[in-house]
Image: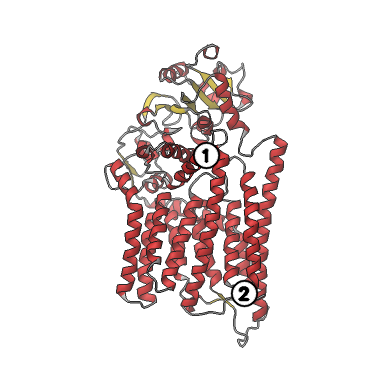
Amino acid sequence: MNAPTLRRPLLVYLVALTPVMGLAAGFAPYMIDGDAVAYMDIADLLHAHRWADAVNAYWHPLYPALLSVAQGLAHPSRANELGVYYVVNLLVFFAQVAAMLWFVTALVLLREAMGAVPAALSLNALRLLGVALLVIAAQRELTLNRVGPDGLLQALVLAGLAMLLQALATDRLMFAPLMGMFFGLAYWAKSFALLLALLAIAVLVLFQWLVQRRSLLRAVTSGALALMVFAAVAGPYVAALSRQKHRFDFGDSGSLNYAWYVGGTEKMHLEPWMTKDFGAAKVELAHPEKQLLALQGAPGAGIYSYKGHALGTYPAWFDATYFNERIVPHVRLEQLAKRDGRNVALTFRYLLNHPEPLILLALLLFAGARLRLRETTFWWPAVGLGLAMWAIYGLVNIEERYVTVAYFAVLLPLFAALEVPAESEDRRDRLLPANALRSGAGVLVILLAFLALGETLRLALQERREQSVAGLAHGWQDPEIFGAAEGLRALGVRPGDEIACVGTKACLDDNYWARLAGTQVLTEMYEPDPKHLIDHLGALANREQAYAVVRAQGAKVLVGYFDPGEMNAAHPASAGWVRLGETAFYALPLNLPGEAAR
């Protein structure tokens, strides 16, 4: 099978993507966390034109802007907004496909510009492989029901890398500013892209000058164009953040996560007197959460008010940088060793969770293909930036959804660098002649791609069957979360009401029930241990005082997530709590009118 014959399988694959991925989005189950709720809350602010309130040093606004556009076009209610947001994610997936095709095309152009090689995989084979890897990622870490910016960031980074490779493959200067534009947009999705953009601009200049032997003036000119456009695109948000923080700032998520994951700083409800929980950080909180009452138990256990920064469904996580302003992490060698050990383990876990392309690469090498990396240089820019991305995340915490684009940037150039040895070469270990190896490589790529697409279809239909058995009209209508919101409405809680929560499950981990009910959590009774929550409440000597403090804040109800088997008359602390439908969420009426409050 030679290169042109892969055009038809590629076209068939791209056509089949639309119905299959549409089914995957249509039957995607509920998977919302506190991060997703924060992005939806920012989308609400953008839709209401509350620009200043939407400026956030932890969550950047490009993905919420897409959700806001969807709100304006579809006018969803809280009850069906997830279906609309899943469609947004589907469109973002197709943007990833376009960016991947662009990236692979630019990679092959640079390969040809740097000297033709007897490639084992044609352009269309590499395109098909790249799209197949996106399909696999959409099954695992970048699923269509994940409301977050990682898929959008991946599309923009791939587009930026494509422009970088195009700039290196041709003499046209237009690709340098296009690269700056895409990386600037990527920064609006996540602050991580700022550092990546600077590295990419450095690669653009140095590779032209030192490897391609272009003039220094030409190399610097292209780099300057990319930098100016990047600054023009990213600059307004940097300025908005700097104005909000009264200092130069391009985003604080990296430093905060370093303090939490590496420095050992307490993540939630840190107070100035909790010096034992500072970890390896200098802490001088500018505006900490207001603790209304200390509770016995774990460090930081207490009642907290968020009225000082009352934005979002759950303000403590809507903008973690506000309540954690002026946490400056320090470096300690023993903590770095623990971090590196954890991230090495996470790297191996990622690779083992994505074995298909590695197996394909091993099969092609076993069949006789060669990787002559010392004799070619076209792969250096993409692989170098891919490893740099992995290393940047490795400074803090490696998560699969973060490093997938780095994996693509490293892996696809390796496939592009595979060569078929000449027939004249003495290869006693060659399993296939050159023509058969090229044909076999194409067949293996087709097999991998269509198996991945078939698995996506199987998973979508399996979800449909499970949802049908459960009697769900839509997969995203989680009975627990939607039942809790309906239960609050039945109690008399109305949209716009202020409420309180207790326990990490109801407060931090999964607070979408509060958004569904149209309420805002402005008071929290912090109990970090999610197990046997009612026992923790029963052990509080000042439990009634705690309830009185929450009631005095004006909260209509106090909501928590309990084991229904423990909520019975035999447990005194369960008195007064009302189960919300058939869920494990319970509400303690505090300031409700009528019978429910008595």
In the rendered image, is residue 481 in sight? yes
Q: Is residue 566 left or right of residue 264?
A: right
Residue placed under numbered mark 1 in the picture: 33
Judged from this view, the residue extending furthest toward the bottom is 424
Residue 531 drawn at (x, y percent) = 56, 31
Colour style of the rendered protein structure: secondary structure
Quadrant position of residue 349: bottom right
Q: Residues within 10 Å of mark 2 (few under 14, many from 20)?
A: some
- Residue plotted at (46% across, 58% down): 157
**Front in this rendered view, residue 538 or 214:** 214
Kind of element beneath mark 1: loop
Find residue 465 and report its horizontal and vertical position in percent: 72, 42
Mark carried by residue 556: none
Examine the rendered structure and indicate whether residue 155 appears above or below residue 108.
above
Q: Residue 380 at what x, y percent from top left?
A: 45, 70
The residue where tag 2 is placed is 3
Q: Extreme front residue here?
A: 73
Q: Nearer the observer, disc 1 or disc 2?
A: 2
